[in-house]
Image (tube, rainbow, N blue to C red):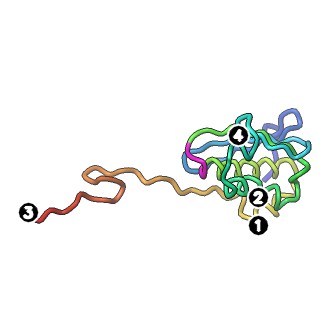
Amino acid sequence: MVASKKDKINGDSLGTGRRKSSVARVRLRAGGGKILINEKELPEFFPNVQDQNSVTSPLAATGKTGEVDVVVRVHGGGTTGQSGAIRLGIARALSTYDEELFQVLRDGGFLTRDARMKERKKYGLRGARRGTQFSKR
């Protein structure tokens, strides 16, 4: 994947991540390792440690944890979807930030979009697949 001019603005690397119904816009710049999500610190936005680890995993895999600042705008979905969207956005921004990190991110599975979505409800059923309860009488 070759970084285009559009992916870098004012020296910042940009990446968009999506997961379920969440969308995250990620901006990466050289700094001290600060992570801001919707103008809140990482532990304040994601109290769950599993979500925090999901967000920081691309940075840990590439060894850029203390070297870059991450600014994220995320909306839609719940906490798991948002953390997955941020993870993909950070991975995409890292690949444009430094071209040599692309293979490490690809091998770690960070650049793969998780396509699983909620199945739509069908008519005549109570949910996507659940039918009505059978009554003998």
Q: Which residue is mark 1?
A: 107
Looking at the rendered structure, the kind of residue marked 1 is Asp
Judging depth in this view, the residue of 114 and 44 nearest the camera is 44
Residue 94: numbered disc: none
Q: Quadrant of the C terminus?
A: bottom left
Residue 137: numbered disc: 3
The answer to which of marks 3 and 2 sits earlier in the sequence is 2
The answer to which of marks 1 and 3 sits earlier in the sequence is 1
User: Pointer 1 and pointer 3: residues touching (CB < 8 Å)?
Assistant: no
Q: Is residue 135 left or right of residue 95?
A: left
- Between the residue at mark 1 and the residue at mark 4, the CA separation in whole angstroms equals 23 Å
The answer to which of marks 3 and 4 sits earlier in the sequence is 4
Mark 1 against mark 2, which lies toward the viewer?
Answer: 2
Mark 1 against mark 4, which lies toward the viewer?
Answer: 4
Number of numbered markers: 4
Q: Quadrant of residue 30?
A: top right
- Label 3: few (<14), some or many (≥20) within 10 Å? few
Q: At which x and y percent is residue 132?
A: 24, 57
Judging depth in this view, the residue of 92 and 131 nearest the camera is 131
User: Pointer 2 and pointer 4: residues touching (CB < 8 Å)?
Assistant: no
Q: Which residue is mark 4?
A: 25
Magenta part of the chain? 77-81
- Label 1: few (<14), some or many (≥20) within 10 Å? few
User: Pointer 1 and pointer 4: residues touching (CB < 8 Å)?
Assistant: no
Mark 3 against mark 4, which lies toward the viewer?
Answer: 3
- Label 4: few (<14), some or many (≥20) within 10 Å? many
- Between the residue at mark 2 and the residue at mark 4, the CA separation in whole angstroms equals 17 Å
Which secondary structure class fits the magenta region best? Answer: helix
Looking at the rendered structure, the kind of residue marked 4 is Arg
Q: Which residue is mark 2?
A: 57
